[in-house]
Amino acid sequence: MGFSANNTLRHVKSSLLPDPLSSSSFYFTLNGKPLSDSTLLPNPQISHLSTLSHLPRISGGGGDGGATGAESRDCYLKMYAVKKPDKVDPKEKRLGKWLNCAFSYEPLREPCVIEKLGNIFNKGALVEALLGKKLPKEFRHIKGLKDMINIKLLMIPGKQSDAADGAMFQCPLTGLEFNGKYKFFALRNCGHVVSAKALKEVKSSACLVCHKEFVESDKMVINGSEEEVAALRERMEEEKSKTVKEKKRGTDVVDGKKDCGKLEGNEKLENGKKSNNGGVKKFRAVDVALANATKEVYASIFTSSKKSDLKETFTCRSLPLGLN
């Protein structure tokens, strides 16, 4: 078969396969490498007596693992990239902490309590968790009712107790909403919850709501910062160690005054408490003898006053000489 200098492999295919549709379904290869139909003949790659293979084309129908050419590197990166968790809105997080119970995450409802670190709870949910021993590790310092402080929250007028949007409580003095934007304190002695702004503007040692006296240590910050919570934790540990020391010493704390258990007179210490029953002398008849009576004669009336020297045997009773 003779070809001119401008012939290509396409001319070779057309001479072998006159049908154009059939010729497009085949291609030539040289040593396993496919050749383009536009390859010129003769060609430096195709030497004399070279063997060309004529192979059919197999078109992919999708799903056969073949690439379509439309894919890009970004597609694979997006496919296998690890999805990052959605960022939590700081505002929603703050509202959730101030509007919901710290344990059950349910909306706050009366009665409410706080513990010694300033977290706020629905009392019913906290008591149930204590009874069922279901408190998480961060609340294990709550052992019973003595670790809870009952608080009194003032609901915003016209606000429904089951409302799901916005704050439900406010400061009884300034009207500031209980939503985390403002600092609030709970007074341990009376339980009223007031804003820090109210305590700052009105300097008083008594509750501004019920006028009950309180000291600085009675102020418990609610949902405080990390530094404030650390200070509350330190104070809680100090109170706990102080209570343990007092129990070891056998002291009583009554109305804020300590009784160190000193004994006076005939007093003795029973279960850490004083008792006046200790050291009482046993009754002796001679100590209350009449003025003109001889002690021995008066004491002889009582059988316990003097032991007899006479002895009794199994067969007879001993009697003084002259009486037998």
Image (tube, rainbow, N blue to C red):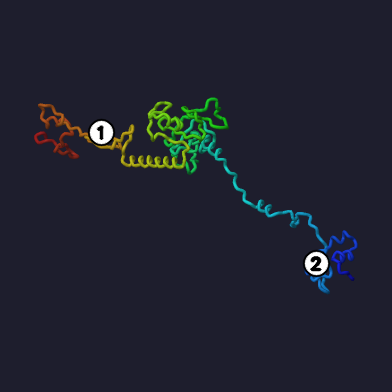
Q: Is residue 105 above or below residue 50?
A: above
**Quadrant in which residue 19 is drawn:** bottom right
- Residue at the limit of the structure toward the bottom, as seen here: 48
Along the viewing direction, whichever of 288 and 166 lies nearer the viewer: 166
Compared across the picture, whether 9 is left or right of 168 comes to right
Give the residue type that dot 1 points to: Asn
- Residue at the limit of the structure toward the right, as seen here: 18
- Residue at the limit of the structure toward the front, as seen here: 5
What residue would you read off at disc 1? Answer: 277
| Crowd band around label 1 with a 10 angstrom C-alpha radius: few (<14), some (14–19), many (20+) | few
What residue would you read off at disc 2? Answer: 29
Q: Position of residue 45 (x, y in %)?
A: 79, 70
Query: What residue sits 17% from the left and 32% below the top?
Result: 284
- Would residue 294 be visible to someone looking at this image? yes
- Cα separation between marks 1 and 2: 121 Å
Looking at the rendered image, the quarter that the N terminus falls into is bottom right
Q: Is residue 85 above or below residue 98?
A: below
Q: Position of residue 316 (x, y in %)?
A: 17, 37
Mark 2 residue element? strand
Give the residue type that dot 2 points to: Thr
